[in-house]
Image (tube, helix red, strand yellow):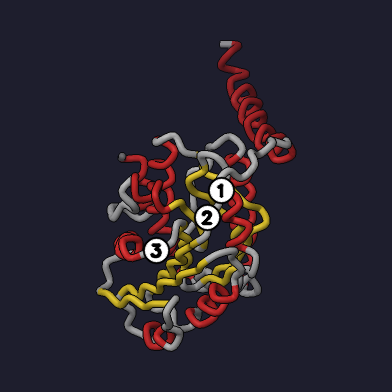
Amino acid sequence: MILLKYLPSIITFFFLLIILSYYILLFAKIKKTHPQSHFSSITVIILAHNEEEYIRQCMDSVISAEFKGKKEIIVVDDGSKDKTADIASQYTSNSIRLIRKKHTGKSDSINKSLSLSKGELIAIVDGDSYIHKNALIEITKEVERKNVAAASCVVRVKNRRKFICMWLELEQIYNSLIRQILSKLNANIVTPGPLSIYRKKELSDVGGFSTKGFSEDIDVTIRLIRRGYNVGFSDKAIIETNMPCNFNGFLKQRIRFARGIIHIFKQ
């Protein structure tokens, strides 16, 4: 009876210790290994579905992004019904190609691009996002470390001045904080869609991205960790993404997130 009386307090105390441990890890200095590999080529896959409002800004940022080596850009128009493909086609060149396909989803688009890519590294960028100029260089440093097969970065909300997006900005900053903390324990299981990077060989070895479910960014990371690889995090690489700024768009996004997590738990 005495134990039952104090049980809520005991549970609260343990949860408090767990939460405090997160922030202790934030300030803990865990020495990272020095880069042991050097990659001289990268393929940036830009995924777009009805992104005519943002695709030009996204492509300009990817083109301007610095990288010490050869940079290939593949834009995948996943069955857009607007002018996304028309805008992207204006950029095509020897190093920039456009793939137009039926709407089969993000994972299928990545896998098709992966089979055509020439880079040693694969960077995935959402078509509604804007990467900072040094983002590719900084995030590449993570996958050049021993046994690091993938890495994520700081995600911010570009349209954060709109009301609902002000709160989503706080959410994204907090999510990035948690990923930074968990990466110190190799427990980060998310390589977010706006910008993530992978070693092509290791990504191909796990079969690329799963076309089942809605959380391909979690699924592929878990499979890499199960193979014994680490997932890094760069706090110097920043990408800004445009988030849904109305209730319907926000609700659709959260339903997709929830369905994705449920699918992950079922595996």
Vertically, is 216 above or below 163? above
User: Which amino acid type is marked by label 2?
Assistant: Phe
Frontmost residue, 124 versus 242: 124
Helix, strand or loop at label 3? It is loop
Frontmost residue, 163 versus 264: 264
Q: Residues within 10 Å of mark 1 (few under 14, many from 20)?
A: many
- From the image, tell me which residue sits under label 3: 118
Furthest-top residue in this view: 1
- Residue 101 in the image: x percent, y percent? 27, 74
Is disc 1 in contact with disc 3, using a CB cutoff of under 8 Å? Answer: no
User: Which amino acid type is marked by label 1?
Assistant: Glu
Is disc 1 in contact with disc 2, using a CB cutoff of under 8 Å? Answer: yes
189 left or right, relative to 18: left
Task: Residue at 38% x, 88% y: name it.
Answer: 86
Task: Residue at 50% x, 56% y: name it.
Answer: 197
- From the image, tell me which residue sits under label 1: 144
Helix, strand or loop at label 1? It is loop
User: Which amino acid type is marked by label 3?
Assistant: Lys
